[in-house]
Amino acid sequence: MKRHRSSLRFLIIEDVKEHEALIKEAVHTHDFLHDISSVKNCTMALELLEEYTNDDYLPHILILDLDVAGMNAREFLIKFNSTKGWQTIPVVTFSNNVNETDRNFVNAYPNSMYVVKPAGILEFMELVNFICNFWSEHKKVPDYQSIRKRIKAEL
């Protein structure tokens, strides 16, 4: 894969091709040159992150599907957040449903955020667009309350 310095470097961990495509499409609607890597499971993500660490090319943000096949997202978050240098990388963890146990687990990490995937395609793309725009303006991922406000404003 050709790598280049870009405004944002994403790592998408998603096993549903349609969701991956929506995220990529939403990211590519911006004027900035974003670099997107994607993997189908958490094991592949850890391997890629190790490679990126050696190349000094870590992503700025991870988008993680909570229900991805293989290594579960909980185990991934534990390993991810115990690796030196990765704890500051924001992780937006999408879930298909509201589960307070999962939400509390994910949100216990200061760099992680639990977000329920919007049901509609447009709402999902708007959410990803919002995250990209927020990053472009503030150089950080929006907090959970900002995302909730955005989702409610769109409905």
Image (cartoon, grey):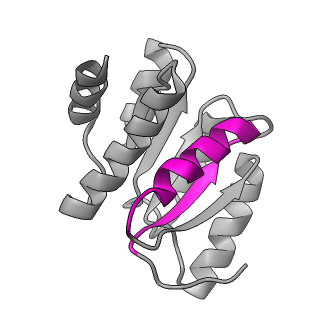
In the rendered image of this protein, does residue 135 appear above or below residue 34? above
Say which residue appears at 69% left-offset and 67% top-offset. Answer: 48
Locate residue 53, reporting x and y percent. 58, 78
Residue 46 in the image: state x and y as whole percent. 68, 59
Locate the N terminus and report the quarter of the image it occupies. Answer: bottom right
Q: Quadrant of residue 32?
A: bottom left
Residue shown at 52% from the left, 61% from the top: 10
Q: Position of residue 84 (x, y in %)?
A: 47, 68
In which quadrant of the rendered view does residue 88 lie?
Answer: bottom left
- Quarter holding the C terminus is top left
- Report if residue 11 lies within the magenta region: yes
Image height of 55 relative to 108, above or below: below
**Is 117 on the left or on the right of 53, as rendered?**
left
Does 88 lie within the magenta span? no
Residue 46, visible in the rendered structure:
yes
Residue 147 is drawn in which quadrant? top left
Residue for point 23% across, 22% down: 153
Give the camera-side residue of 57 and 153: 153
Horizontal arrangement in the rendering, residue 89 relative to residue 154 (left or right): right
Give how far across and how far down residue 75 sits, in percent.
64, 40
Q: Is residue 86 left or right of residue 134?
A: right
- Residue segment shown in magenta: 7-31
